[in-house]
Image (tube, rainbow, N blue to C red):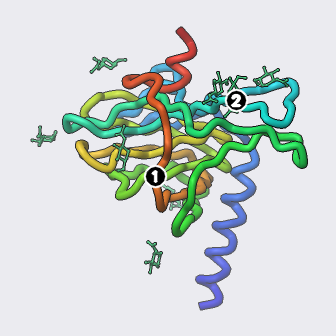
Amino acid sequence: MFFKYLATTLAFLSVLSLGQSQSTDFPTESGFPTPSATISAGPVLPSPSSGVAGNNTSVKVTALVGANNATTLQCWQLQPNATFSQSTGAYIQPLGDFTNASLAIFNGANSSFVGLTTTDKPQWTAFLAGGGTIRLHGSGQFATFRRGDLFVANDTTGSQGHESLWLPGTVALQLPVSGAVNYVVINNNGSCNAATRN
Ligand SMILES: *[C@@H]1O[C@H](CO)[C@@H](O)[C@H](O)[C@H]1NC(C)=O
Ligand SMILES: *[C@@H]1O[C@H](CO)[C@@H](O)[C@H](O)[C@H]1NC(C)=O
Ligand SMILES: *[C@@H]1O[C@H](CO)[C@@H](O)[C@H](O)[C@H]1NC(C)=O
Ligand SMILES: *[C@@H]1O[C@H](CO)[C@@H](O)[C@H](O)[C@H]1NC(C)=O
Ligand SMILES: *[C@@H]1O[C@H](CO)[C@@H](O)[C@H](O)[C@H]1NC(C)=O
Ligand SMILES: *[C@@H]1O[C@H](CO)[C@@H](O)[C@H](O)[C@H]1NC(C)=O
Ligand SMILES: *[C@@H]1O[C@H](CO)[C@@H](O)[C@H](O)[C@H]1NC(C)=O
Ligand SMILES: *[C@@H]1O[C@H](CO)[C@@H](O)[C@H](O)[C@H]1NC(C)=O
């Protein structure tokens, strides 16, 4: 029992220490491509130089959506806009109400392959450490996420889902939404980064 606990603790600590270094050396086994061959799908956050009460700004995030037996990427503008908070000096973007939030702590020594999954309810995922690549079933696209990235999985129907390959020591905060994510689709086939790159 003690050794099991010790092993778990050591594994957890190694995850935390590995998580400190931002690796761009994504694993490429199982047919996953190098990051240069993938779509960078992190959020598109505004960086306002200043704000005043009543001011607002839009935040865009990449969403995984399912249709016609495939998962594809969309770029969503979240609703309502982020508003400036005088007490914190920051723009605050509502993300909705969550249920049963969790941390996914992946193997600290080896990369982790996760087979096809769909999401049963819309869910935010934020990367606190590590990152990796998601393969979108059916569309044949690959999307790359790095530490600090945020996306919403919304492939609840219409697809067999997505599979993924995560760097050793990846830690992801998972926030299933109890209500709905409110959004306007600004690109119905592509990530936010792809949308703004052009
Ligand atoms: C309001 O926010 C926008 C977008 O970030 C920014 O460009 C603008 O300067 C802000 N306006 C004021 C009055 O701070
Ligand atoms: C947000 O800012 C835009 C541009 O400054 C303004 O037209 C709009 O009315 C504002 N919306 C809200 C809800 O305050
Ligand atoms: C949201 O913010 C953008 C600027 O980032 C502004 O152009 C737009 O009018 C705002 N929308 C609303 C509904 O306030
Ligand atoms: C969806 O894809 C799977 C595997 O590629 C295939 O077996 C199935 O028939 C497809 N379903 C539809 C409705 O196209
Ligand atoms: C949250 O998880 C617990 C334990 O697995 C479960 O009993 C509960 O029904 C879940 N709550 C919701 C809202 O899904
Ligand atoms: C990592 O992979 C190697 C080679 O497959 C294996 O020997 C080792 O036990 C794995 N370590 C962990 C912590 O999963
Ligand atoms: C996102 O998920 C919700 C809840 O399952 C669904 O109603 C909505 O149509 C989905 N949006 C897209 C663009 O697939
Ligand atoms: C979506 O975009 C991909 C590549 O960016 C393209 O191959 C595919 O045909 C597009 N799908 C639709 C329905 O436009």
Q: Is residue 173 left or right of residue 73?
A: right
Total numbered labels placed on residues in the image: 2
Q: Is residue 154 left or right of residue 191?
A: left
Mark 1 Cβ and ligand 7 under 8 Å apart:
yes
Q: Is residue 155 left or right of residue 87?
A: left
* Residue depicted at x 88% and y 47%: 88
The foreground one among 35 and 197 is: 197
* Residue depicted at x 40% and y 33%: 32
Q: Amino acid at mark 1?
A: Ala
Q: Badge 1 is on which residue?
A: 180
Q: Is residue 117 left or right of residue 78?
A: left
Mark 2 Cβ and ligand 3 under 8 Å apart:
yes
Q: Is residue 190 above or below residue 32?
A: above
Q: Is residue 89 above or below residue 38?
A: below
Residue 24 at x, y percent in the picture: 63, 32
- Work out how far the residue at label 1 is from the one at label 2, CA to CA, in angstroms: 21 Å
The foreground one among 16 and 139 is: 139
Sequence-earlier tag: 1 or 2: 2
Residue 142 at x, y percent in the picture: 41, 30
Q: Badge 2 is on which residue?
A: 57
Identify the residue at the far top of this view: 198
SS for tag 1? loop
